[in-house]
């Protein structure tokens, strides 16, 4: 009997693998590291993997645009779960050495962005050498040909690679978190848990005052909070955007299905990308007039009026 | 076989009778003049009359508060039709006489309000004597004991009473119209005609900025125009209001039933008083995203998402 | 030295006189009873009276349309003060008699409206005879020719007229209040007191969804509560309205002057009818972001940006 | 006499230099290539350069987060101009060779993102080697030690470097444009031209329904269109955002200064980053009720009311 395949942004040791470990143990799932977010998602679309685990948002760096743009492109994928991974970085060296001696340091540009200030202060003489991943940057130190002396990576990679740690917790912003999503082909949506998110993609209809407000109004008028809103270019030119939105609630909840049906009326190009449990299990307050019970009583009233007969 | 009874604000000859004539011929309905709007409506509530025909709004004087307040008081009545009657007034006298000679003139205070400016100019010496109806004021002239010499009434009353017309078309505002409604006990609602009105009563929930806007937003966000909005005191104190609202559309139309269900969620005290054809048969423009077809496609999309199964 | 003239809806003993007594003592003002609200206001316009005291709203019967329509008609008048008068009614008779014996009872139609239910229960045999004022109805009983036996009037009139009181506190709604306004020609506006009202008249620009919302939004977006909103026909036909609005605040407060300037931009026909102290001296909560201090700091920021020079 | 220094993201030949050429000729400005957007901006803050030219937005890739985050961080910089540069890419090789032979190709990750699909199709065997800039990737080919065979860069770099062009116009999206801004220290704002943009940074006050709407309402209610809206994390945790917004109009226009003052009242942390001419000189339609003339007439009306004296 075959285990489901989980494609993820490799190589081993990345934060994405840390996310994947929260989703499924290596005993129950087949871990498949791939070279890019795009490849991971393509394997799911093609049925070569059952799931992909990809980063979607970082609390410091913002949205992961490759993920946002790829999953927004069609309705061929569905988010089924989210996972949060705390982000911390260490500096590893080929050997023990003083920080001042370091003249070049490698890591992925996203990683570099998160230690920029620390590096400006503690690595005054170091040039940044971009790597295709933080793990690749670290592993590069094992190659004697490599001309940089240090790398920024996760504690897990440092441990796996076995290189000396020159400094730890070097991230500029303590408490940084990256949010990953688990993606599959479209299928049945899980049951509401009372603490869910729904992800939608909404192309902004035209370049006019109030278009975005009209979209947001569909949520706020129904008491639906947005936990993420990200604008992305459609590629059709400056000023042409779509919005990637996470809202609090599940499609099977009345206020959410009403808001989505309303959005569809306004913007038929809206895309539903999934309803799934919140990783933090935080419960949200629903205004009394937009609970499922309120919706049912409003609908019952109208139904009764429409059906009544004479006395 | 008994004809249905139509209670209306009498006596004969009033504008209300003119409205009733548009609704049913005396051959097919039993005309029953009563002394007040309240009585007419009470007879319908009690089942003593099948219908009441009562004025609800005048294009010059505004809402007829007795009607508005009475039908708003509970859900025991339903508006099934509206009728428009053009309003014109004549001055009748006991005998032919010069206008300057007139020292007192009688009519209903609503009638008086509509000829006030004309009277100030042409009846400089006349005191106003209130009557219980314009017809009663005119008929009073037939009584030799009456101490006023003239009355303001409708052309129909003048004709029925047979008194000399001293001046005609004396209304201050040409083209005035009174709108009447035909009221029955609650029962089945007629089919949508594509040119309908719906009347609702909405208590204003509390004395705070935005409460009224929240109500109106339920209509405007769904592209529903309001053809009448009237504030009335609830009687509970200054600042406590309800709104009597006519909106364009029929309860059986999706955007209207959605708006009413939403209102009910916000304000469970909302009352539905009927959906009925417009007297002027004017058609309204519904924004494309709030047509029934748009609602159905939005609901179909959500239903399909909720029902889909894996591949 | 002449005392200012106060025109009011007479005759003596009416609730309007009770309002006037709160405004100025007979020693300091010349009380001038006139036959109608229209006449009182016309005397002020003409400079024949310095002030008029007229009813504008009743907690049970709603707006006094003659007042609303007349003061809304142009910018020739200004409200300088409001007065609240509790409304209670008594039944007086020509002689002591049983209520069942009464076959006709007189009063002003507004007064009748406020005792309708009581009368239906306790005066089963009485016909209603309209009078031009509650005081006139009562005084009519002193005339032996009068063919009605009882009248509904204020306790003050009953006392002045000296007729036997057959029943007291007969109003259907306990605690009813009528609100009067003191009106002068336009002039300087009093200082803000921290508990003020501002009255404006806003013609509804066109018959379209959202027009009223656009008006109300100017207030709610600035945290301004409305204490009264009354729709009135313009006389130009059904569906053509203006709104008479009382808002909480004084024109000299930034959020109010900003809202009014914004209304003027949208609807140049808007009319300002006065800023004056609330009779109940109730203070209102202003959201922190719309206090005068907040306005000043926002303007100061922009001014500083516009004025800054290079470094 | 010294020419002003323009810091820009080097090395020579980048699209940023192409932008700079539109701003000032090398005869009139001192071109100073630096290693990063951050460094360019830091030199302006420190007074070491008078101007920085940095990319802020790409029509395909979206916002340039390093620029957005850095200039949003305080009020130490001001945008004084924008420049648009069409983006096209070529593939250069160390020597003429077949595309299939290429096993590794270098460029900046942003450049790679824009040719991803072309590369997937035409460079089936190539691994991506990240470079610190597209120019650096190309120049690397001149170094015999470099282990990649090709690079993606701009036509200008290809020309400057003198390497064979293996393929041109290889960008996935034709017509792509990058928008650059010219930044200085805060100082006087240029005059309105009738076709301007204003850039502001607005921290989202709290995680609640409607907070973003409240912000946007300040613009839409004043008829101000947004040409760009970008959400960015504040770094304080998932769900904590600020918005970088370009709006159509100039601070010296009444509707813009009113909107900004209102924003300041709501969110004192709002930052103004400049008003400057649009690069495309497109003119925008201002609703009649929010023109400067409309603002002036509304203010004049209120001022007249406040200043009037008695008659």
Image (cartoon, coloured by chain):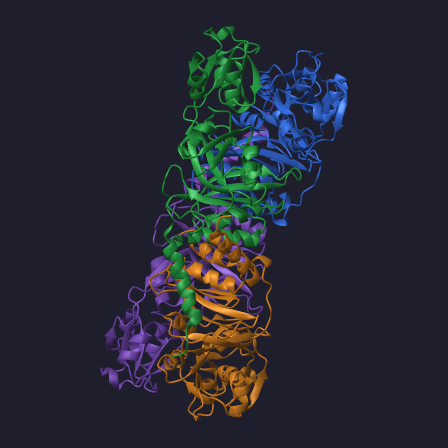
Chain colours: A purple, B blue, C green, D orange
Q: Residue B62 appears at what percent x and percent y? A: 60, 33
Q: As drawn, is A153 to the left or to the right of C259?
A: left
Q: Work out which quarter of the rendered image holds the N terminus of chain B and state it.
A: top right
Which corner quadrant of the image does residue C109 belong to?
top right
User: Total label count?
Assistant: 0
A271 or B122, which is in the foreground? B122
Q: Residue A35 appears at what percent x and percent y? A: 44, 72
Which residue lies at the image location 39% right of the left edge and 75% below the top edge? A109
Q: Is residue C100 above or below residue A231?
A: above
Q: Is residue A38 above or below residue D93?
A: above
C179 or B180, which is in the foreground? C179
B303 or C108, which is in the foreground? C108
Q: Residue B288 appears at what percent x and percent y? A: 64, 49
Q: Is residue A105 above or below residue A239?
A: below
Q: Is residue A307 visible?
A: yes
Q: Residue D218 appears at what percent x and percent y? A: 48, 57
Q: Is residue D204 visible?
A: no
Q: As drawn, is C195 to the left or to the right of D189?
A: left
Which corner quadrant of the image does residue A110 belong to?
bottom left
Which residue lies at the image location 47% right of the left edge and 85% below the top edge? D135
Pick out the residue farthest to the front: C1
B284 or D185, which is in the foreground? D185
Q: Is residue B29 above or below residue D270?
A: above
Which residue lies at the image location 36% right of the left edge and 54% below the top edge? A279
């Amino acid at each position: 009997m075959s285990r489901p395949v989980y494609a993820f942004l490799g190589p081993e040791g990345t934060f994405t693998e840390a996310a994947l470990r929260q989703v499924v143990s290596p005993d129950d799932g087949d871990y498949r590291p791939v070279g890019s977010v795009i490849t991971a998602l393509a394997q799911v679309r093609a049925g070569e993997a059952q799931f992909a685990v990809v980063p979607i948002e970082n609390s410091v760096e913002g949205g992961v645009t490759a993920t946002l743009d790829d999953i927004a492109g069609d309705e061929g994928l569905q988010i089924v779960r989210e996972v949060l991974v705390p982000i911390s970085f260490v500096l590893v060296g080929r050997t023990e050495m003083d920080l001042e001696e370091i003249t070049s340091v490698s890591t992925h540009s996203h990683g570099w962005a998160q230690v920029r200030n620390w590096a400006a202060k503690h690595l005054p003489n170091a040039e940044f050498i971009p790597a295709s991943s933080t793990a690749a940057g670290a592993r590069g130190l094992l190659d004697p040909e490599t001309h940089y002396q240090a790398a920024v990576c996760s504690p897990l990679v440092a441990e796996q690679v076995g290189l000396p740690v020159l400094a730890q917790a070097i991230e500029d912003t303590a408490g940084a978190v990256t949010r990953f999503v688990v993606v599959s082909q479209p299928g049945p949506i899980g049951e509401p848990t009372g603490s869910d998110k729904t992800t939608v993609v909404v192309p902004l209809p035209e370049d006019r005052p109030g278009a975005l407000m009209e979209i947001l109004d569909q949520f706020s008028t129904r008491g639906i909070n947005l936990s993420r809103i990200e604008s992305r270019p459609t590629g059709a030119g400056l000023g042409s955007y779509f919005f990637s939105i996470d809202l609090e609630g599940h499609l099977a909840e009345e206020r959410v299905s009403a808001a989505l049906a309303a959005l569809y009326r306004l913007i038929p190009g809206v895309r539903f990308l999934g309803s799934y449990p919140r990783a933090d299990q935080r419960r949200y307050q629903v205004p009394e007039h937009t609970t499922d019970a309120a919706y049912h009583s409003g609908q019952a009233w109208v139904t009764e009026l429409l059906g009544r007969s004479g006395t």
